[in-house]
Image (tube, helix red, strand yellow):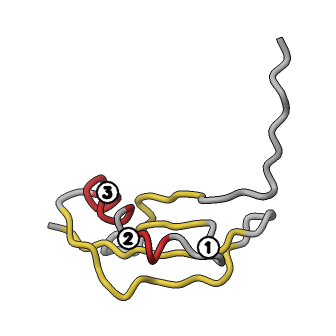
Amino acid sequence: MSLFRLHRGWREPNGLVTDHVTSGQAITAASAYEAMAAALAEGDFLVTDDTNLVWLTNEQDVLVWSLRLDDEDIQTEPAVP
């Protein structure tokens, strides 16, 4: 089993991550995939008004998964036939 940490923050349109918070509880899982599934179950930590980015790090503090929750700087264009 490995130890993972769940983080959240705000990603500015220029990519800068601010308001970084780390969850107080560690996620123990056999793989990054299992840790990701456990992280997604942490809805109260993940979904807040001041969060648009969440990520997991492993025991070496290396990023193993991330999810951008909202990108206000991305605009979609209609498909051109």
Q: Residue furthest top?
A: 81
**Circle 1 residue:** 51
Q: Secondary structure at mark 2?
A: loop
Query: Are the residues at dot 1 and dot 2 in contact (C-beta closer than 8 Å)?
Result: no
Q: How many marks?
A: 3
Q: Residue at x 53, y 70 (%)?
A: 47
Q: Residue at x 27, y 73 (%)?
A: 27
Looking at the rendered structure, the kind of residue marked 3 is Ala
Instruction: Give left or right: position of 28 versus 75.
Output: left
Residue 38, above or below 45:
above
The image quarter in which residue 73 lies: bottom right
Instruction: Give left or right: position of 56 versus 19.
Output: left
Q: Horizontal and vertical percent for residue 8?
A: 53, 75
Q: Horizontal and vertical percent for residue 48?
A: 58, 75
The first of marks 1 and 2 along the sequence is 2
The label number, if any, that marks residue 28 in the structure image: none
Looking at the rendered structure, the kind of residue marked 1 is Thr
The label number, if any, that marks residue 37 in the structure image: 3
Q: CA distance from mark 1 to mark 2?
A: 13 Å
Which is nearer the eye, 29 or 59? 29
The label number, if any, that marks residue 42 in the structure image: 2
The first of marks 3 and 1 along the sequence is 3
